[in-house]
């Protein structure tokens, strides 16, 4: 039986989320009330039958390791296979590799020990519910070296500008990968590659002193590779800025969109936290909002997302905002178009106001 292993490559993901990535990498940023961005990629892999996943970390990965633990919440705490967090570890004095090629080179034994002959490689910024089994079958059927997961853009947003676009020839093979903003066929950053071809391309890139596997190994060799595409249809989002993070969170206040993302198989898995149900006091007023468990609400909440353990005291008003875990909002405070990171404390009668295009962001553990 042909199987895939998974790699979540965080090496090339820059910290575009400003205050939210002061103390954590982008993959560990909370999302939608109880999840982290990496949950979507990891859940899609597991639900697609992948039982062996490596994560190439770059910097600020303590929060990520705390969230993932042993991988038990994704059924990856296994005797064989399972979850492998592979931080930068450059101890080979003869190693001449650079960029993300160093991760592939220095963890070569991880790939060689695996019984899987195919590898699914992804980042963490593409949010979707995608079953990769169909893409894998397409990869096998076409005898592809590489299969790119693509999606058609209907509405253009700023976060799409830096993502690559795919051009096909008359035989539906990939003939070019560009940054043409007028091309609606977007490469999601997820692709399947045959393991033998991966190893061959890694060696070639390192020998010629290259530093980016996808650019130098795949794009530069399109004329010699059989590169196919598989189009993902359904919900998707790219989180690459505070503006896109805020907008896609707020979009989930639509009940239909929320159900489409979280109520359908493959379900999104996350770290389990045993919290009591949210307590709504008699003064509480909550409208069109998402509240995780463990909250204690006495104030007014409108069009907002509250993570676990948030405390909102009497007379406080929160509108169009994202309030992360264990924040405290004291009496008569006013928040509108605000993002509070974890453990923020807003004092009595303080007012913070941003706008939808540029929400006011407060880093974690701040007291205001």
Image (spheres, rainbow, N blue to C red):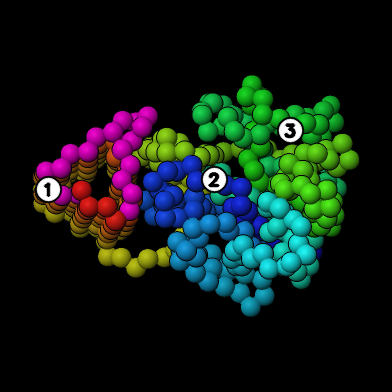
- Where residue 244 appears, x then y in whole percent? 45, 36
Left or right of 236? Residue 207 is right
Q: Residue at x 42, y 39 (%)?
A: 242
Residue range in magenta is 346-364
**In this view of the protein, which residue sits in the foreground, 14 or 40?**
14
- SS assignment at label 2: loop
Q: Which residue is mark 2?
A: 14
Residue 282 appears in the figure: yes
Q: Earlier in the sequence, mark 2 or mark 3?
A: 2
**What number is the disc on residue 348?**
1
Judge whether 68 appears above or below 353 on screen: below
Q: Is residue 367 above or below residue 349?
A: below
Front tag of 2 and 3: 2
Asked whether residue 331 is drawn in magenta, I would say: no
Compare marks 1 and 2 and give the one earlier in the sequence. 2
Comparing 239 with 15, the one in front is: 15
Q: Which residue is mark 3?
A: 177
């Amino acid at each position: 039986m042909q199987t895939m292993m998974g790699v979540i490559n965080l090496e090339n993901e820059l910290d575009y989320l400003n205050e939210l990535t002061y103390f954590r990498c982008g993959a560990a940023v909370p999302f939608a009330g109880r999840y982290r961005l990496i949950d979507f990629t990891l859940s899609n892999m597991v639900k697609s039958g992948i039982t062996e996943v490596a994560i190439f970390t770059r910097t600020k990965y303590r929060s990520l390791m705390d969230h993932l633990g042993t991988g038990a919440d994704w059924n990856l705490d296994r005797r064989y296979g399972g979850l492998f967090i592979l931080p930068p570890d450059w101890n080979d004095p003869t190693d001449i590799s650079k960029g993300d090629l160093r991760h592939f080179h220095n963890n070569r034994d991880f790939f060689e020990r695996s019984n899987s002959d195919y590898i699914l490689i992804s980042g963490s910024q593409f949010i979707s519910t995608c079953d990769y089994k169909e893409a894998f079958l397409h990869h096998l059927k076409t005898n592809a070296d590489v299969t790119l997961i693509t999606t058609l853009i209907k509405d253009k947003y700023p976060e799409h500008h830096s993502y690559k676009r795919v051009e096909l020839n008359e035989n539906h093979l990939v003939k070019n990968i560009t940054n043409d903003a007028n091309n609606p066929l977007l490469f999601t950053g997820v692709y399947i590659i045959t393991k033998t071809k991966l190893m061959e391309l890694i060696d070639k890139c390192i020998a010629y002193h290259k530093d980016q596997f996808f650019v130098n190994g795949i794009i530069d060799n399109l004329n010699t590779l059989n590169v196919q595409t598989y189009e993902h249809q359904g919900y998707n989002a790219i989180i690459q800025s505070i503006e896109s993070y805020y907008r896609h969170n707020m979009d989930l206040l639509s009940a239909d969109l929320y159900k489409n993302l979280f109520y359908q198989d493959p379900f999104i898995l996350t770290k389990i936290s045993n919290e009591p149900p949210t307590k709504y006091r008699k003064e509480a007023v909550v409208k069109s909002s998402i509240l995780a468990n463990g909250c204690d609400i006495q104030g007014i909440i409108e069009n907002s997302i509250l993570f676990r353990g948030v405390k909102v005291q009497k007379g406080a008003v929160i509108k169009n905002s994202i309030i992360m875990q264990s924040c405290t909002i004291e009496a008569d405070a006013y928040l509108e178009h605000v993002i509070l990171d974890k453990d923020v404390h807003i004092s009595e009668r303080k007012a913070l106001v941003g706008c939808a295009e540029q929400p006011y962001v407060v880093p974690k553990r701040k007291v205001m």
